[in-house]
Amino acid sequence: MAEISAEWPTFVEPYLKQRPCLALCLALIDISVPPQESDRQLRDFLSAIGRPYIIVATKSDRLSGNELQNALRTFGQQFSDSPMLPFSAKTGAGREQLWQEIRRAAQAVQPVATNLL
């Protein structure tokens, strides 16, 4: 993990900062564990550069209904100004809503992307 983090400034930051047609960043965060410092750092970075993003709270199927609501509340307190979507690859929960967000963002940036071609 440390090796990947060390390479972030060289590869990931320029990509996220310089891609005008990048419509939406998906920040995948494991909802079954408490918020991590790296989660906050990613959210702060995306906010600072003005890049649209949504937090995708993965592994939501691992929590009961009450546990999921409590975890979403905890993350919501940590990331109050961030859009968040619970998601489960296993059950498909949140899949259609996530695709709707991606389509909406892509349609909003489509004229910019077309002009770059």
Image: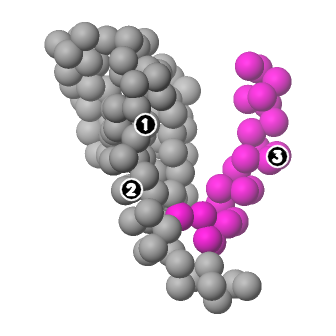
Residue at 17% of width from left, 13% of height from top? 66
Pick whichever of labels 2 and 1 is earlier in the sequence: 1
Count of all numbered marks drawn on residues in the image: 3
Residue 14: percent from left, percent from top: 74, 56
| Residue 101: mark | 2
**Main secondary structure type of the part rendered in magenta:** helix
Q: Quadrant of residue 33?
A: top left
Q: Which residue is mark 3?
A: 10
In the rendered structure, the answer to whether residue 26 lies left or right of residue 9 reads left
* Three-letter code for the amino acid on which mark 2 is drawn: Glu
Residue 68: percent from left, percent from top: 26, 18
> What is the magenta range?
1-23
Q: Nearer the viewer, residue 103 or 75?
A: 103
Q: Which residue is mark 1?
A: 56
Contact check, label 3 and label 1, Cβ < 8 Å:
no
What is the distance, in whole Å, between disc 3 and disc 2 at their CAs?
A: 29 Å
Q: Nearer the viewer, residue 72 or 58?
A: 58
Which quarter shows the C terminus? bottom right
Q: Nearer the viewer, residue 88 or 71?
A: 88
Q: Residue furthest left?
A: 66
Contact check, label 3 and label 2, Cβ < 8 Å:
no
| Residue 87: mark | none
Q: Of circles 3 and 2, which is in front? A: 2
